[in-house]
Amino acid sequence: MPLDLYYCITSPFSRSVLLTSRDLGVELNLKEVDIWQGEQFKAEYLALNPEHTVPTLVDGDLVLWESRAICTYLVTKFAGDDSALYPRDAVTRARIDSLLYFDIATFFPRFRAFMHSQLGGKRDSTYDEKKEKFHESLSWLEKFLSRGPFAAATDRITVADLVLVPSVTSVIEAGFVPDKHTRIYEWVKRCQEGMVGYEEANGQGAQLIGKRLRGMISSPPQASGKQAQ
């Protein structure tokens, strides 16, 4: 039976799971959660995922709500013992894992902090510091991408790309990646061309969140709950 995926298309973390499932050819029973309307706080969803985040995967008795863990779980379960998406080779897997941690602990948190420092068009006292830290993370990513065609210094797409590209394209669509980061833009183009079902699984959602983020900067901020991970 298909696995259930509770997701929101504007969430880059949901889109990483969608991209992974497309690459694997794994059918998912999609259940949309409108985080902008607070559906993640409904009792039935909290009973499933007390952290009220998206995405959440349900596979029989297993319930997962860490998107990177979901992606590696899907590859491990459906792609065999040594998938090119998440190889057993220790060096390649270490590079992939380091980029998954970079996304969750550095890149996206720094972008989120930078966004929050300018909501409603008003730059707070932390704006300059948050901007510098965010641009530092962009420069690091640019350097990572000098190692090979894809993020983990590989010649083909891995889980690292499937996880990073939704975050990065969301930021690009919001207008926050300068043109000077040519390796980032070239890498995104390779991902667009090489990822299965890219536009439906990621492109459209990235455009939607980019538009929403631009609106959050130009208009008064609105309260919202914890939405993704």
Image: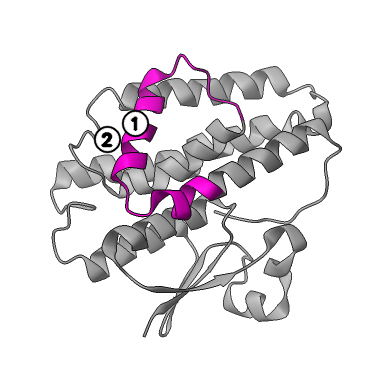
The span picked out in magenta is 175-204
**Which residue position is annotated with label 1?**
187
Mark 1 → mark 2, Cα distance in angstroms? 7 Å
Q: In the picture provided, is 122 more to the left or to the right than 212?
A: right
Q: Is residue 119 left or right of residue 128?
A: right
Where residue 37 sits: x, y (%)? 76, 62
**In magenta segment, residue 185:** yes
- Most common secondary structure along the magenta stretch: helix
Q: Earlier in the sequence, mark 1 or mark 2?
A: 2
Residue 184 in the figure: left or right of residue 96: right
CB of mark 1 within 8 Å of CB of mark 2? yes
Kindly indicate the quadrant of the structure image that contains residue 227. bottom right
Residue farthest top in this picture: 180
Residue appearing at x 83%, y 26% in the figure: 122
Q: Secondary structure at mark 2?
A: loop
Which residue has dot 2 on it?
A: 150
Amino acid residing under circle 1: Trp
- Magenta includes 110? no
